[in-house]
Image (cartoon, helix red, strand yellow):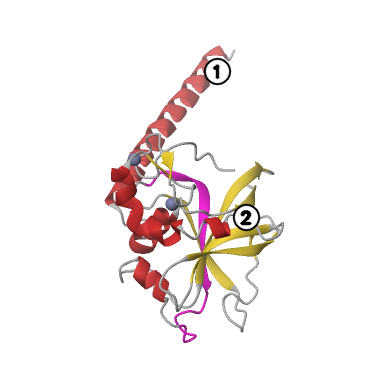
Amino acid sequence: MLPVGNQCAVCSEPGKLCAGCKNIRYCGVECQQADWKVHKLLCRTFNDARDAPSPNMVRVIEFPVNETKPKFRWMPIDFDLFCRPLEGDFFGPDKPVPSIQSINAHPKTGKLLPLTITFMFRDNLLKDGSLPNKSVYNFTNGRPLNDARGPVLFYGSIPEVEAEAGWKIFDCVDLDTIRLNVIKDWLTLGTDAAPERRAYQERNSAEATAAAVANRDSALETLRKRLEEMP
Ligand SMILES: [Zn+2]
Ligand SMILES: [Zn+2]
């Protein structure tokens, strides 16, 4: 499972389990209250969704079109190189091939997440008459960045094995109440909107440039030595 440890979901200090769901941790009342507006949407329902109804299923977070808030849902797993939930007729009786967008970094801080969270939606949602998604609109206070229409869901996956060069096998991982804030930030801000994220990227690319220059310098140095040693 994921290395969540005993960290407070808000500030990363050591925290105690939420008494309602025994899933998320907070260091104290202040952090718990700061997160409650989002966490309360799933806190009380987590116990009912705790255990898989049968093997080979994954717990996803669904945003129903005509309900006011998100909820957990267990779905069968499609085992492939990139594991994903089997949607069946989740996206409608016409069973469209869904599209996906993956979240690998925290939308606000830009830090890599310990899992990939993937957004699944009707590919043709803008043209097929899909209705605006009420639970997404509520969740984002009416300001979703993505034009979320029709039913949508989020699922989690983690890279399991580094196979052949460049290939990773992804395994499904159950989403719980802990990542709901990341989902909210992503629905509201998108991937590149936050100034903190841009700053992080710039810092990272400065470090990468410095590392590349150092690499090049040491390669040149090696080359120079070899040339000197040549008869
Ligand atoms: Zn805290
Ligand atoms: Zn809770």
Horizontal side of 187 relative to 119 (left or right) equals left
Q: Amino acid at mark 1?
A: Arg
Q: Secondary structure at mark 1?
A: helix
Q: Position of residue 36 (x, y in %)?
A: 34, 54
Residue 210 position (above or below residue 18): above
At 37% from the left and 41% from the top, the residue drawn is 205
Camera sees residue 154: yes
Q: Position of residue 197 (x, y in %)?
A: 33, 48
Beta carbon at label 2 within 8 Å of ligand 2: no
At 38% from the left and 38% from the top, the residue drawn is 12
Q: Position of residue 214 (x, y in %)?
A: 42, 27
Residue annotated with mark 1? 226
* Magenta region, residue range: 110-130
Residue annotated with mark 2? 51
Dot 2: within a 10 Å radius of its alpha carbon, few (fewer than 14), some, or many (20 or more) residues?
A: few
* Quadrant assignment, res 229: top right
Q: Secondary structure at mark 2?
A: loop
Residue 75 position (above or below residue 161): below
- Mark 2 or 1: the one toward you: 2
- In front of the other: 90 or 66: 66
Q: Position of residue 127 (x, y in %)?
A: 47, 84
Q: Which mark is residue 39?
A: none
127 magenta-colored: yes
170 magenta-colored: no
